[in-house]
């Protein structure tokens, strides 16, 4: 594709996230030049950016904060590319996103700009709101409304809900009828921008500059589009979380400026305000169920007629204008735990209904997110305060420096700002210089260079002893995190202080295929087989105080044994997003043992012998049934593969399960034998143990 693209990222005290955003753009399949503008007014922040940014990035450091629009205009004036991509520092592109956006503009010559599908979380659960241009009556939302005016605005919001549902569920590029482009993630055609007077109006310091541009593009005859196959993750509100009141003031000023620019004296609004004041009756708003407990997320029992598809909308106004959305199915609808840890402090409203355009009675739920320690500036740490809980990332490595670099980069690009890096070199080549290179990207580093190879479990215990964080997480040198992995897990644990461990789904890649593991917590299932990879889970230091340690007699499945110990102390939180990446890369390093199925199966049998004496007969029977279901599902899949091969005409012999299949069936075999011993039964000659 012959298209020149310039990417503009404006940073304000989010160096780590900015580096992650820039890296996601440079990793795209289409070439683009990344410019980063620093508005932080902080020499330390600028130095951190110089350290963390790729050498291919251009960095501009402003002595004072010029605002988002002016910073973008500066880069726009210095470049001449055909397309301009705007990306917020608290967002990142998923693979191939930029290529798809550019292709959309090339295929649609009248399109002035295109926006991707935007998600609030890496798990693709929470959809970002679309930018709806302010209606002329927008200022009425802050006033006391009469019943007539309030119900009219409620009906208007349901009309916008129907349009938003259509856009959210679309799978192909389409024109946006009313929605605009969000300046935090959009690709613009330079010719269109020049034709309507340039990029951003410099009078808009922080907000509404993208709404103004969308107005001008539409007025100039250009179309605005969405490419839903392109995806970005945008943790909206991540910038300047500690300055919520200042941001609110900026938003109000921008709204007033925008309404004056496009509606002038706005006589219609003045007449509506007079009519609203003179109408009889009490002030009206939708019936609201208030959740008094701060950060308590609303939940709903789903009516039978909605179980095939429902929608939760969340917004900062009771009329649910420009909401974020959660589409789902099933009998229970809940807002994810992670949202409590990610939303900026404030009051929010939620509306629940079917995932179809329909009339909804004005019934909503209200909940509140209070400021937490994590909403204060991280620089307060220098005054002896600890505003963010320290998270220790323990990396075990052995003789894989190139893989270690990738793992450490994943840690450095985390959106969570207060991380301690603990590297345990398990008897391999010294890698202290690599750890030192990442010292500026984290709060602290610790390096444990073991004189000889002590094994996976022993190396893990060394890391636990060296770590100082309130929360701990492992990352082996051949695995990776997505940028918001730690932030999502910390948010989940802080929203449920009685829980001590949270885990996400895992993406397993390697050998030309990929597979996702993401199962809700079930104690019997955990006892039957491991639920998640070691780096998918974040746990509290209190587990160590309860005596949880890695069993050094195990050279495989030591993490499973640790989770079984933890499950005796606490229930686990399942964060429904896939942000841990497990890679099969070879047979070296600390994970070498897992690539020998015979030895791994022997270790699994040892683990079962250790734990079966602690489980009741009822638990053992439940494990047998769970393992039987797993084994039968594997058998059904094998038979389906055989049938599909036969139907295709190319009949070939399907290999029966080898060492890996026997390994998966081992819990069933062990539990069945234990049950026989428990009941003092002898195996019948007529029944073959599988």
Image: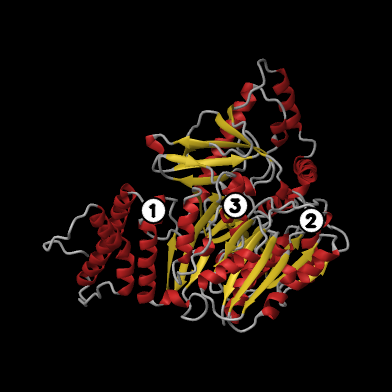
Q: Is residue 514 left or right of residue 378?
A: left
Answer few, some or many: residues within 10 Å of disc 3's Cα (few below 14, many 20 plus, some between 14 and 19).
some
**Quadrant of the drawing holding the N terminus:** bottom right
Mark found first going from the N terminus, 3 or 2: 2
Residue ID for mark 1? 614
Q: Is residue 79 above or below residue 677?
A: below
Q: Is residue 305 left or right of residue 229?
A: left
Residue 233 in percent (x, y) is at 59, 58
At which x and y percent is residue 664?
33, 65
Residue that lies at the very extreme toward the bottom in this rendered image: 429
Relative image position of residue 200 (x, y in whole percent): 77, 56
Residue 512 in sight in this render: no
Judged from the image, the secondary structure of the residue bearing numbered disc 2 is helix
Q: Which residue is mark 3?
A: 542
> Looking at the image, is mark 2 or mark 1 earlier in the sequence?
2
* Circle 3 or circle 2, nearest the eye: 3
Task: Tell me the quarter of the image containing the C terminus.
Answer: bottom left
- The reply to whether residue 289 is in sight is yes
Tag of residue 381: 2
Could you tell me which residue is drawn at 27 percent across and 62 percent down?
669
Q: Assign a secondary structure to mark 3.
A: helix
Residue appearing at x 54%, y 46% in the figure: 336
The residue closer to the viewer here, 572 or 318, is: 572
SS of the residue at dot 1? loop
């Amino acid at each position: 594709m012959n298209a020149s693209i310039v990417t503009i990222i404006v940073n304000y005290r989010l160096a780590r996230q900015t580096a992650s955003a820039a890296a996601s753009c440079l990793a795209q399949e289409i070439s683009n030049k990344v410019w980063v503008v620093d508005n932080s007014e902080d020499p330390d922040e600028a130095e951190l950016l110089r350290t963390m940014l790729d050498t291919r990035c251009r960095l501009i450091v402003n002595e004072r904060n010029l605002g988002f629009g002016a910073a973008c205009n500066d880069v726009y004036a210095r470049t001449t590319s055909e397309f301009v991509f705007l990306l917020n520092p608290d967002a990142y592109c998923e693979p191939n996103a930029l290529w798809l956006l550019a292709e959309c503009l090339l295929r649609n010559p009248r399109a002035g700009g295109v926006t991707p599908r935007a998600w609030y979380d890496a798990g693709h659960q929470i959809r970002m709101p679309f930018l709806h241009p302010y209606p002329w009556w927008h200022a009425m939302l802050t006033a006391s409304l009469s019943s007539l005016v309030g119900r009219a605005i409620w009906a208007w919001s349901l009309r916008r809900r129907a349009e938003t549902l259509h856009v959210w569920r679309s799978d192909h590029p389409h024109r946006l009828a009313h929605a605009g482009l969000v300046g935090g993630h959009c690709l613009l055609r330079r010719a269109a921008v020049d034709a309507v007077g340039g990029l951003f109006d410099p009078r808009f310091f922080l907000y509404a500059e993208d709404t103004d541009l969308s107005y001008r593009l539409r007025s100039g005859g250009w179309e605005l589009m969405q490419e839903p196959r392109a995806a970005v993750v945008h943790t909206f509100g991540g910038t300047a979380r500690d300055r919520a009141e200042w941001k609110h003031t900026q938003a109000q000023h921008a709204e007033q400026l925008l309404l004056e620019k496009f509606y002038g004296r706005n006589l219609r609004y003045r007449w509506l305000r007079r009519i609203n004041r003179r109408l009889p009756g009490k002030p009206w708003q939708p019936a609201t169920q208030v959740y008094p407990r701060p950060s308590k997320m609303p939940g709903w029992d789903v009516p039978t007629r909605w179980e095939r598809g429902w929608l939760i909308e969340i917004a900062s106004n009771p009329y649910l204008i420009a909401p974020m959305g959660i589409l789902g199915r099933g009998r229970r609808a809940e807002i994810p735990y992670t949202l409590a840890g990610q939303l900026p402090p404030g009051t929010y409203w939620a509306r629940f209904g079917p995932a179809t355009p329909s009339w909804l009675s004005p019934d909503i739920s209200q909940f509140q997110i209070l400021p937490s320690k994590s909403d204060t500036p991280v620089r307060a740490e220098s005054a002896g305060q600890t505003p963010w809980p320290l998270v220790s990332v323990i990396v075990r490595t052995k003789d894989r420096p190139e893989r270690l670099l990738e793992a450490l980069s994943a840690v450095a690009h985390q959106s969570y700002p207060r991380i301690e890096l603990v590297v345990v070199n398990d008897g391999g080549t010294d890698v202290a210089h690599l750890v030192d290179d990442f010292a500026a990207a984290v709060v602290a580093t610790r390096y444990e260079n073991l004189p000889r190879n002590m094994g996976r479990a022993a190396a893990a215990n060394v890391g636990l002893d060296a770590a100082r964080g309130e929360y701990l997480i492992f990352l082996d040198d051949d695995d990776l995190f997505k940028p918001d992995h730690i932030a999502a897990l910390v948010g989940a644990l802080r929203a449920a202080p009685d829980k001590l461990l949270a885990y996400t789904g895992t993406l397993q890649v390697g050998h030309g295929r990929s597979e996702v593991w993401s199962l809700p917590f079930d104690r019997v299932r955990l006892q039957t087989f491991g639920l998640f990879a070691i780096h998918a889970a974040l746990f509290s230091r209190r587990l160590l105080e309860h005596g949880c340690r890695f069993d050094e007699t195990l050279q495989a499945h030591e993490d499973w044994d640790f989770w079984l110990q933890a499950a005796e102390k606490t229930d686990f939180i399942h964060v429904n997003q896939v942000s841990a990446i497990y890679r099969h890369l070879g047979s070296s390093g600390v994970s070498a043992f897992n690539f020998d199925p015979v030895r791994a199966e022997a270790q699994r049998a040892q683990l079962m012998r250790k734990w079966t004496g602690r489980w009741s007969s009822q638990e053992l029977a439940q494990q047998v049934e769970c393992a039987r279901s797993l084994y039968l599902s594997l058998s059904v899949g094998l038979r389906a593969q055989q049938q599909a091969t036969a139907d295709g005409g190319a009949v070939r012999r399907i290999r029966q399960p080898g060492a890996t299949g026997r390994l998966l069936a081992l819990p069933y075999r062990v539990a069945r034998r234990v049950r026989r011993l428990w009941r003092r039964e002898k195996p019948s000659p007529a029944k073959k143990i599988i």
